[in-house]
Image (spheres, helix red, strand yellow):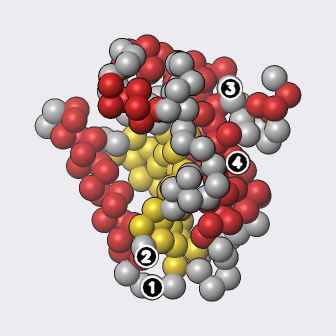
Amino acid sequence: MTPLEEVLSGRDERAACQREWLAAGGVFVVQIALNIPGYPKSAPNDEAAVMRARSLLLERSKALPSAERSIRNGAGFCWQAVFDASRFDAASVKRAAVETENGTSAGRVLDIDVITENGAISRISAGFPERRCLLCGRNAKVCARLESHPASDLRECALRLLEEGTFEAGEAERK
């Protein structure tokens, strides 16, 4: 398999796991992964970073999952959890997710998705701006579509943020 095929296969596996939980009805799924440009999609200490983000998210959201699992494949490492929608509000968890991404320096490489039976909750629908580019600060989707930066520069920045940054609450605001 090519690296791209490994990533696509890994994403398919993640999506299948999400659909499995969502099929039960009355639930939503949270997935925490890392945005690591280029290949491989893994990085030193990626599991520790995702699990620290998990702890922060659960602390901020005050939500407790019914079940959780970790997946490591060609798409990298991720954590997934299912939450009872009658006990916890998916939109509130998404707001806590974006606050976790925005509130720590290393959080800029986090990708925390909240997926309901109707699809993923976007940053915009949760009242937050689009994700910013790691290098220039413009809209990340626009930079990606235009290929504004070499993948190697983006990867280097992401790995540096993971290495140098922390996931301590409020840490980004103090800098």
Q: Sequence order check: which comes first, mark 1 or mark 4?
A: 1
Q: Residues within 10 Å of mark 4 (few under 14, many from 20)?
A: some
- In the image, residue 165 sits, relative to residue 126, either above or below, namely above
Tag in front: 1 or 4: 4
| Location of residue 106 (image quadrant) | top right
Task: Identify the image quadrant of the C terminus.
Answer: top right
Task: Evaluate if marks 2 and 3 touch, with contact meaning CB atoms under 8 Å apart.
Answer: no
Q: Residue at x 34, y 42 (%)?
A: 75
Q: Sequence order check: which comes first, mark 2 or mark 1?
A: 1
Tag in front: 3 or 1: 1
Measured from the top left, where is residue 62 in percent x and y?
76, 66
Measured from the top left, where is residue 132 in percent x and y?
55, 32
- In the image, residue 160 sits, relative to residue 120, either above or below, namely above
45, 60: nearer the viewer: 60
Mark 3 — residue? Answer: 165
Q: Residues within 10 Å of mark 2 (few under 14, many from 20)?
A: some
* Secondary element at tag 2: loop
Mark 1 — residue? Answer: 25
Task: Identify the image quadrant of the N terminus.
Answer: top left
- In the image, residue 19 sits, relative to residue 43, either above or below, namely below
Q: Which mark is residue 82?
A: none
Q: Is residue 109 left or right of residue 102?
A: left
Q: Residue at x 62, y 67 (%)?
A: 91
Q: Residues within 10 Å of mark 1 (few under 14, many from 20)?
A: few
Q: Which mark is residue 117?
A: 2
Amino acid type at image mark 1: Gly
Mark 4 — residue? Answer: 99
Amino acid type at image mark 2: Glu
Measured from the top left, where is residue 168 in percent x and y?
77, 38
